[in-house]
C-alpha cells in the first residue's frame, strides 16, 4: 500500500494545516473514538518559585480562542505554581493511536462567568466535592473529608443550586509551541512542530525522532 504523504513528506495523519489547532482537534476527535477512557486527559507541567517542576494529569474541558481550558482548585499546588509562573506545558498521549501532542505556552485565569457556567454543568457530587476538598492540603484522617462532604451536602441539598466555590475555577493555556508526534517502527517516529511567530502566524518544522 502506498501511503499518502503531506507536504513535508510526513504521513497523512499530519494533514496540511497552516496552524496547529485544527490538527489538534482532528487528533482529539480520533482519540475520542479509539481511547478506552478519558481521551481528553493530559499531563500538566508547572514550575514552582524554586524552579522545581511538577506534573499531574487533568482533563481538557474545552477550547477558548485557540487556548486549552481546564478546571481546578485555586488553592492547589498547581494553582500556586501557575500564579507564580504562568508558563506551563501540557502533553496528551493516546496509546490507542500511538500519538503524542506536546504544547507549551502561558496560562491565565478564565472569567468568573465562564467558570460559573461550566460549574453548573457538573453533576451534584462533583459540585459538592469541589466545596469539600481542600485540594493538595494534608488531612489527618479520611473521615475529616467525609465529614466535610456531609456538611456541604446538608448546606446545599441535592436538587438545590450549588454555587461555584470561590476557590474553584479554570485556566486557559494559550500555546506558543505545539508538537505532533506519531509512532513509527524501530523508533523512527515522525515529529512536526508549530511555533508561533512574532507576526502572529505559525512556522512549521520537522524534528528528528
Ligand atoms: C485522568 C485524570 C484526570 C484528572 N483531572 C483533573 C482535573 O481536571 N482537575 C483537577 O484539579 N484534578 C484532576 N485530576 C487530579 C490531578 O492529577 C491532581 O491529583 C490534583 O489536581 C492535585 O494536583 P496538584 O497537587 O498538583 O495541584 C485528574 C487525575 C487523573 C488521573
Image (cartoon, rainbow, N blue to C red):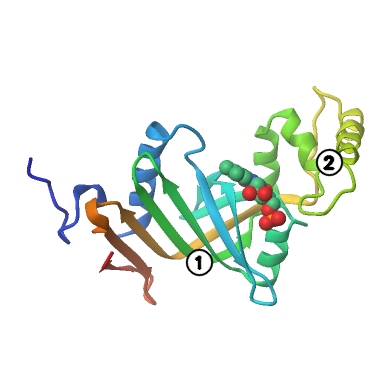
Give residue 143's position: percent from left, percent from top: 89, 37
Q: Nearer the viewer, residue 33 or 173?
A: 33
Front position among marks 2 and 1: 2
Q: Nearer the viewer, residue 53 or 17?
A: 53
Q: Nearer the viewer, residue 14 or 48?
A: 48
Which quadrant of the rendered structure holds the C terminus? bottom left
Callout 2: SS: helix
Residue extending farthest top: 159
Q: Quadrant of residue 198?
A: bottom left
Which quadrant of the rendered structure holds the N terminus? top left
**Residue 10 in sight in this render:** yes
Above or below for 87 versus 171: below
Callout 1: SS: strand
- Crowd class of label 2 (few under 14; some 14 to 19; many from 20; radius 10 Å): many
* Horizontal side, residue 134 vs residue 117: left or right: right
Give residue 44's position: percent from left, percent from top: 56, 57
What count of labels does the image hold?
2
* Horizontal side, residue 61 vs residue 204: left or right: right
| Residue corresponding to mark 2 | 132
Q: Residue at x 36, y 69 (%)?
A: 195
**Residue 16 in sight in this render:** no
* Horizontal side, residue 203 vs residue 25: left or right: left
CA–CA distance between discs 2 and 1? 31 Å
Which numbered disc flags the more N-terminal residue, 2 or 1? 1
Give residue 75's position: percent from left, percent from top: 78, 57
Residue extending farthest front: 186
| Residue corresponding to mark 1 | 105
Give residue 176's position: percent from left, percent from top: 44, 67
Amino acid at each position: 500500500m502506498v501511503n499518502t504523504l503531506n507536504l513535508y513528506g510526513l504521513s497523512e495523519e499530519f494533514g496540511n494545516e497552516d496552524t496547529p489547532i485544527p490538527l489538534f482537534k482532528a487528533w482529539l476527535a480520533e482519540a475520542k473514538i479509539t481511547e478506552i477512557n478519558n481521551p481528553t486527559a493530559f499531563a500538566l507541567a508547572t514550575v514552582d518559585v524554586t524552579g522545581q517542576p511538577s506534573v499531574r494529569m487533568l482533563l481538557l474541558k474545552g477550547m477558548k480562542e485557540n487556548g486549552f481550558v481546564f478546571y481546578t482548585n485555586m488553592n492547589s499546588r498547581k494553582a500556586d505554581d501557575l500564579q507564580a509562573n504562568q508558563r506551563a506545558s501540557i502533553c496528551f498521549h493516546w496509546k490507542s493511536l500511538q500519538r503524542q501532542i506536546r504544547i507549551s505556552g502561558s496560562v491565565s485565569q478564565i472569567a468568573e462567568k465562564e467558570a460559573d457556567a461550566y460549574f453548573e454543568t457538573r453533576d451534584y457530587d462533583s459540585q459538592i466535592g469541589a466545596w469539600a476538598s481542600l485540594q493538595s492540603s494534608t488531612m489527618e484522617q479520611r473521615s475529616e473529608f467525609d465529614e466535610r462532604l456531609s456538611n456541604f451536602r446538608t448546606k446545599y441539598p441535592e436538587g438545590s443550586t450549588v454555587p461555584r466555590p470561590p476557590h474553584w475555577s479554570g485556566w486557559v493555556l494559550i500555546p506558543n509551541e505545539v508538537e505532533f508526534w506519531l509512532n513509527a517502527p524501530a523508533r523512527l517516529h515522525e515529529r512536526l512542530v508549530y511555533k508561533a511567530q512574532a507576526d502572529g502566524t505559525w512556522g512549521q518544522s520537522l524534528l528528528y525522532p
